Amino acid sequence: MNISPSEAEEALAAIQKMTRRTRHTISSSGAYIFLIYTGMIWLVGFLANQFLPGSQAVYVWAAVSILGSVLSIATGMRVSKRVQGPLTGMYGKRIGLFWLLLALFCCAVIAVIQPIDAKQLTLVIILFVLVGQSAMSLVFSFAYGWWAIPIGALALAGYFLMPGYFYLWMAVLVGGPMILLGLFIRWRW
């Protein structure tokens, strides 16, 4: 099949236009907000793990997780009004069920492997979250979840290469970039 240079240019322009529209749709949907929330929760929670005694860190995690959940639910309800479609409710339920099942499988894996320390437990949970995010990107758009791969690689690198600073690593090099990525999507897409 031979195509002329002008046909190739038209096809490339159509691809670029679709890429811009996809990015704009993701940006205007409010999806970036959840990256910012997750990044802030991870930043504060992992800093607490690194610098506070275990019992105090648990309270910090509980507080930021509850706050993040409330903000995410409220934001999701507000944003969902802008992105309603005929199948939104069905997909929303399926997505919720997917995350519930993934959490149950994560709990089952934790019960089977019984992590030796809190860092192992943390990494298992993070990896499950990133697998879930990757699955969501396969369903919706690769642009929605490509970041899960480098964040997973950074988490593994911190765990294996800097175990004494794992939580600081997670706060600065994983939580921080999630916040920056959310801001980048919001302002540059």
Image (tube, rainbow, N blue to C red):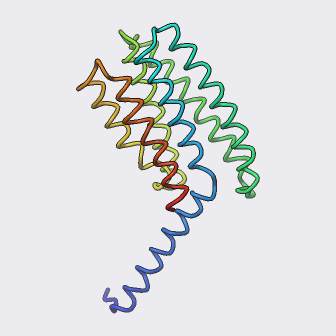
Q: Residue, x 53% and y 34% (percent of image)?
A: 40
Left or right position of 188 against 76:
left
Left or right position of 117 against 22:
left
Q: Nearer the viewer, residue 165 or 96?
A: 165
Left or right position of 2 against 142:
left
Q: Position of residue 137 (x, y in %)?
A: 49, 49
Q: Nearer the viewer, residue 150 or 171?
A: 171
Residue 49 to residue 32: above or below: above
Q: Residue, x 59% and y 46% (percent of image)?
A: 33
Q: Position of residue 73 (x, y in %)?
A: 70, 37
| Residue farthest toward the left in the current orientation of the protein | 161
Mark count: 0
Q: Which quarter of the figure has residue 112? A: top left
Residue 103 to residue 59: above or below: below
Q: Position of residue 60 (x, y in %)?
A: 56, 18
Q: Residue, x 57% and y 29% (percent of image)?
A: 101
Q: Position of residue 53 (x, y in %)?
A: 45, 8
Q: Nearer the viewer, residue 113 or 187?
A: 187
Which quadrant holds the N terminus? bottom left
